[in-house]
Image (spheres, helix red, strand yellow):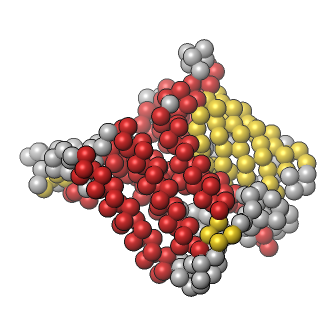
Amino acid sequence: MKKLLLVVLLSINLIAGGTLNTIPATENNTSDAIKTDNRTYFEIAMGKPEKPLTDEELINRVIYANVIGAGVIAVWGTVFWDYFDSTPKFGSEGWFGEDTKYGGADKLGHMYSTYLWSLGFSSLFEYWGMSEEQSLIYGPLTSLIFQGMMELGDSFSSSEGFSYEDMIMNTIGAGFYYVREKYPSVKEKLDFRLEYIPDLNTKVDVFTQYNSMKYLMALKFSGFENMEDTAMKYFELQLGYYTRGYQDHESYTQKERVAYVGIGINSSEVLKALGWTKTSKIFNYYQLPYTYVPFGHDFDVPEYVAPYSRPYRGYKK
């Protein structure tokens, strides 16, 4: 359930980033945005300041966000997770080996989650009036602290435990966000995405269904000057990884750890060409299923994996 909180931050990013516009209330348009104290109720809920904040006030808000976040994690973890049920446990979970709990899918999940938290916090800080340059620093740092507090809470959990590998992947996720936003040429060429089709026939919560997820990097041809005005801009090269059967393994006939290379359609670029510029941004972070041709290798068999030669969720019983 930890990834449930990502939905909130993604919503903040889409709104703060301009995908939704607040319409000022008028005599003929009072239902679109109800205003109070010169701000809409939405703006009040999001903490939009009534007047520009000083740098000191903005930094204080960042500190408060971290303190409140730590408090929420502590309370939520105590009530809904098994935080503080045991003495602290610190150790190694391994990386992508066949003897690991999730075959490494959870490690990429940590990287991706921290990457999205960085996006969400940076967008929120900019919404409050922080400069893009400052938010680019404080967003990933806050994300890393937030994820680190979860990992610290896990150390007091009887079912989890603090993982050094998880913290390393959290750091990589925050660092990748910083680099991608800092250097426009990287952002134009490279996306980190999650592909996910929820499985409603499993008891595993929808936000940690690694059997239904794939993580990938996409090299977008539209980011290259010699291709941006050609038909090649609608295509991309993908490098991905996924596992099947490690989680809920009793429901599977075999385990899979698959790395693949794919040639795909750049869904974001297609939507932009259709005039759906704001909607297209979603597909910089989410991979639309079945819009690419993958060529993979299963490390558990091992064998070549032909494009779409296996069921989406692997060999389930």
Image quadrant occupied by the C terminus: bottom right
Q: Is residue 59 left or right of residue 103?
A: left
Q: Residue 270 location in percent, x, y? A: 54, 30
Which residue of the protein is positioned furthest toward the right in this rendering? 302
Residue for point 58% across, 29% down: 189
Q: Residue 88 location in percent, x, y? A: 59, 78
Pick the front one: 134 or 104: 134
Residue for point 59% across, 74% down: 155
- Residue 66 visible to the viewer: yes
166 to 176, vertically: above or below: below
Q: Residue 192 location in percent, x, y? A: 59, 42
Q: How many marks?
A: 0
- Quarter of the view holding residue 134: top left
Residue for point 35% across, 50% down: 124
Q: Is residue 89 left or right of residue 59?
A: right
176 to 186, vertically: above or below: below
- Quarter of the view holding residue 243: bottom right
283 to 199, vertically: above or below: above
Image quadrant occupied by the N terminus: bottom right
Pick the front one: 254 or 9: 9
- Residue 266 visible to the viewer: no
Which residue of the protein is positioned furthest toward the bottom in this rendering? 85
Q: Residue 274 location in percent, x, y? A: 48, 28
197 to 157, vertically: above or below: above
